[in-house]
Image (tube, grey):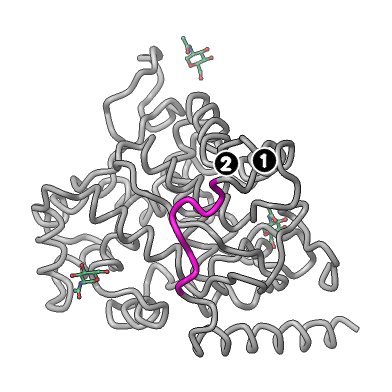
Amino acid sequence: MKKVKQAVALLILRLCLLANIAGLSHGALQVGFYRGKCGIADVEMIVAGVVTARFIRDPTVVAALIRLQFHDCFVNGCDASILIDATNSEKTAIPNLTIRGYDIIDEAKAAVEGFCPGVVSCADLIAIAARDAVFLGGGGRYEVQTGRRDGLVSLAQSVSISIPGPSASIPQTMAVFANKGLNLTDMVLLMAHCSIFKDRLYNFRSTGRPDPTMDSFLANKLRARCPLDTTTTAANNTVDLDQNPFQIPFLDNSYYRQLMLNRGVLEIDQELALHPLTRATVMSIANALDFPIQFGAAMVKMGAIEVLTGMQGEIRRFCTATNWPPFT
Ligand SMILES: *[C@@H]1O[C@H](CO)[C@@H](O)[C@H](O)[C@H]1NC(C)=O
Ligand SMILES: *[C@@H]1O[C@H](CO)[C@@H](O)[C@H](O)[C@H]1NC(C)=O
Ligand SMILES: *[C@@H]1O[C@H](CO)[C@@H](O)[C@H](O)[C@H]1NC(C)=O
């Protein structure tokens, strides 16, 4: 029975991919898709309220929400498939260990459902929340596109083939990004940025410690590369910085400047700064005066990967389950 379900899921997955290749689902995203569609309520304002309240309690949600969108979009498109709770869903795959923020999306969903049930997709909530996270993290505010629909399929096995591992080579990583329609600049902006993995190094699942599955030698090297920002509002001077949960993550290009200044220590970042294919891009980002604009543009591009629009997919009632659950 499970085999059949998986075969059907794979078939649907392939059909979705084909539809995307045929271009059937592109071009329908727009800024302000929900304007006038949720009574007098402003959907983006509601989400911003939820994310901001969380951010005040826990600034590490910035990295968490950006990574949530990264993982959603790279696996089977930006369709909220990462939110599905099921035996073999994407969530259960290994990279889920570094992902948090599911509850923020659930909270935002409950809030918008209170104004206009069945209108706002979970996939859009992820995108809007990530935009707010970037803004709160000091990365600037970009206009987020909306109009995505929610996917019906979520499979753990899709994860490993879609997310480039930390030891992937530059050409391998480039191929993964190119396959999603993202170029070298997008890759360096999205992949290399510490925010993608930062709280794995410092505050894994709010424990105040690094991810225990991460090699400690590796973690220490990464921590040297991605120091926590020292501008902090926290009053607790006695606590070691690394264990201080009250850090304001700051999204800027200082990471790239470090890459250019320090000789590389570690695989992917060392390679980014030294590899002939990426060196110029890293340097250009390190020197960019418009980093927030570039980063926002890459986020928008990522948010358009293999989206479902129009009549495709559905609008989930609860983000953790499809409406007619064939795969739970
Ligand atoms: C993450 O994956 C582990 C291992 O497969 C699983 O036990 C856990 O429930 C998953 N976490 C979530 C939030 O789904
Ligand atoms: C990547 O695409 C963006 C537009 O989406 C463009 O501004 C940038 O120059 C491109 N970078 C490369 C290396 O082609
Ligand atoms: C400082 O940190 C310790 C240990 O985490 C905690 O018990 C204490 O309440 C903190 N103090 C303040 C003022 O935040």
Taking the spot 49% from the left edge, 34% from the top edge, the residue there is 208
Taking the spot 40% from the left edge, 79% from the top edge, the residue there is 176
State the residue in front, 197 or 252. Answer: 252
SS class of the residue under badge 1? helix
State the residue in front, 192 or 40. Answer: 40
State the residue in front, 251 or 307. Answer: 307
Residues shaded magenta: 27-35
Looking at the image, is mark 1 or mark 2 earlier in the sequence? 2
Q: Residue 210's mark? A: none
Q: Residues within 10 Å of mark 1 (few under 14, many from 20)?
A: many
Name the quarter showing ligand 1.
Answer: bottom right
Judge whether 212 appears above or below 29 on screen.
above
Q: In the shown orientation, is residue 293 left or right of residue 262?
A: right
Residue 8 image position (x, y, % from top left): 78, 86
SS class of the residue under badge 2? helix
Q: In the shown orientation, is residue 35 left or right of residue 296?
A: right
31 inside magenta stretch = yes
Residue 193 image position (x, y, % from top left): 31, 54
Taking the spot 70% from the left edge, 86% from the top edge, the residue there is 10
* Quarter of the figure with residue 241: top left
Q: Which residue is mark 1?
A: 112
Q: Which residue is mark 2?
A: 43
Pick the quarter of the image with the N terminus. Answer: bottom right
- Determine whether label 1 and label 2 are within 8 Å by CB: yes
* Quarter of the figure with residue 36: top right
Q: Residues within 10 Å of mark 2 (few under 14, many from 20)?
A: many
Residue 300 image position (x, y, % from top left): 38, 59
Q: In the shown orientation, is residue 114 left or right of residue 35?
A: right
Pick the quarter of the image with the C terminus. Answer: bottom right
Q: Residue furthest right?
A: 1
Three-letter amino acid code at disc 1?
Answer: Val
Judge whether 109 appears above or below 77 on screen.
above
